[in-house]
Image (spheres, helix red, strand yellow):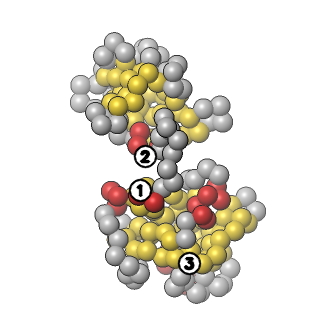
Amino acid sequence: MSEQGAVQSADDHVVLGKLTSPYGVKGWLKVYSYTGPMEGILDYPEWVLRRGDRLERRRLLQGRRHGKGLVARLEGCESREAAEALAGVEILLPKAELPALEAGELYWHQLEGLRVVTREGAVLGRIDSLFETGANDVMVVKGALEEGALDARERLLPYLPGEVILEVDLEGGVITVDWDPEF
């Protein structure tokens, strides 16, 4: 990929989606979006593309819903061959460009990697990822990721503040939960 502009490290970014495959012959690409709603990814006029360790900036020229997915055309991508070269590339956004949240709201990337501890002090593991179920978000907690965890199990905990989630300490890197480790 060619350099379109200087970019900070990947740690300063959050993954918004992925370019999956070419669409047509004029440089358009199919986009898999991790944003909610799906079209939210099109609100950002410039994307950072990551392939391996390489990062580059590309302006979003056009984007729209197409069927059940999205398609987009990026700066410097004028042909099917150019689009093929971008297939499989992740779409990032600098964390500093994320919209401000209301008090008490968090982005998923802020929760990933937090140590999960029960109110009794038992260490369940670390949050590996999150996913939506429709009713609520679910945290994937892996014991194998945290030294001192009760076991190496993977647990699925609902993200329900005030019920399961008792406290989120971002600075301390810990989330305290009301959860039976045997469940």
Does label 2 or label 3 sit earlier along the sequence?
3
Q: Residue furthest left?
A: 147
Which image quadrant for residue 5? bottom left
Q: CA distance from mark 3 to mark 1?
A: 21 Å
Q: CA distance from mark 1 to mark 2?
A: 9 Å
Q: Which mark is residue 105?
A: none
Across and down, in percent, residue 54 comes to 34, 71
Viewed as shown, does residue 101 lie left or right of 1?
A: right
Mark 2 secondary-structure assignment: helix
What amino acid is at disc 2? His
Residue 144 shows up from this direction: no
Residue 85 versus residue 11 in the image, above or below: below
Mark 1 secondary-structure assignment: helix
Q: Which mark is residue 74?
A: 3
Q: Which mark is residue 109?
A: 2
Residue 159 versus residue 42 in the image, above or below: above
What residue sits right under mark 1 in the picture? 95
What amino acid is at disc 1? Lys
Across and down, in percent, residue 99 comes to 51, 54
Residue 49 versus residue 141 in the image, above or below: below
Viewed as shown, does residue 121 lie left or right of 69?
A: left
Badge 1 vs badge 2, beta-carbon distance below 8 Å:
yes
